[in-house]
Image (tube, helix red, strand yellow):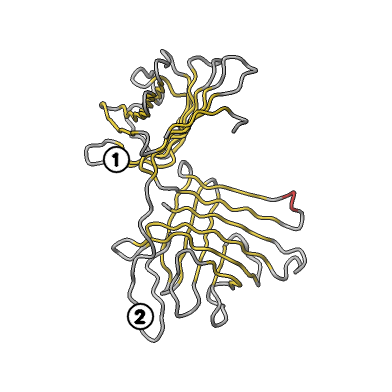
Amino acid sequence: MFRFIRRGAVAAASVIGLAGALLAVSPASAAPVPESSLSWSIESSDEQGEPLTGVFTEPAARFQSLRDRDIHRLNVTSASTYWSISLAAPVGEQLHPGNYPNAERAGFQTGRAPGLDVSFGSSGCNQVHGRFTIHQIGFDAAGTINMLEATFVQRCSPGSPAVSGTLKYKATPLSYRWTLTDQEPTTAETHTYRGATSTFWAQTFWSNSLRFGASGDRLNDTVEFSPPQGERFAVGATYRNAQPVGAQDPGRPGLSVERLRCRPTTGTFTIKELEYGTDGEPVALSATFTIKCTEYPSSENPDVLKGVIHFHA
């Protein structure tokens, strides 16, 4: 699909419940569907002009991944519109999650500069002044990219209009965002973990709880979910009146968030997607939660932590 608009107009593990005997494990939901899309913005050469923006999505648009030695090229075609995004690692390296500043034209880099070359229609740059960020990347046995989530900014000269975009190729969401609000909402603190600077994990814990963690940007966070004793997680279900995991009353779900250390707490969470691998460990988790202190600093003005988890889902 291609939309042409102007700005202004527009995971955990196999969870086994105990109810006198171990329950059989079955997939919690259908496997997440990878996304291929390109959203882009082209600055106007007139400083007063509005940027042109657009979005391509599969299946209306066709996405193709190619490799020419050290250069990886992603082609995007929609009707008569064609984009090509080439990426190259610095000499002697392989592309990996991270930030790549000071990019030069791919295939014509000097020294240890990374390579970037974005062309669309008949437009492109003889010289490139750019940068790109890779949040996720994967390769097939031949070394060709088979999964990618990246952003890019390219200029033909330091002061020329920028072409920027977000490219996803067979990628599933990977991020964790939390927001901590105290009794002064204007002082809310927030942070988002992304793949360029962070690592993520998910695993089961004991027999009926699920742990998710993120590490990066000098921070570490862990979230643990548990259904009521004797139950398994139900995808799409919202669990209310959650207590700290391991200290739940009968029939109550569990929610513990390392960043919110006060006790006691109460919370609500929704398991939007949960998928397990053949080894019984989680390979995909999408969840949201809200947890708050009930006595500190006061029951009238509790600390509240909200989170959104996307672990390949």
Q: Quadrant of residue 125?
A: top left
Position above or below: 277 against 246: above
250 with respect to 190 (left or right): left
Q: Residue 54, how many percent across, how many down? A: 49, 30
Q: Amino acid at mark 1?
A: Phe
Point 38% across, 62% down: residue: 29
Position above or below: 284 against 57: below
Q: Residues within 10 Å of mark 1 (few under 14, many from 20)?
A: few
Q: Residues within 10 Å of mark 2 (few under 14, many from 20)?
A: few
Q: Secondary structure at mark 2?
A: loop
Do residues under tags 2 and 1 come within 8 Å of each other at their CB atoms?
no
Point 31% across, 37% down: residue: 145
- Cα distance, mark 2 to mark 1? 39 Å
The numbered disc on residue 139 is: 1
The numbered disc on residue 79 is: none
Q: Residue 40, how many percent across, how many down? A: 48, 29
Position above or below: 171 against 94: below
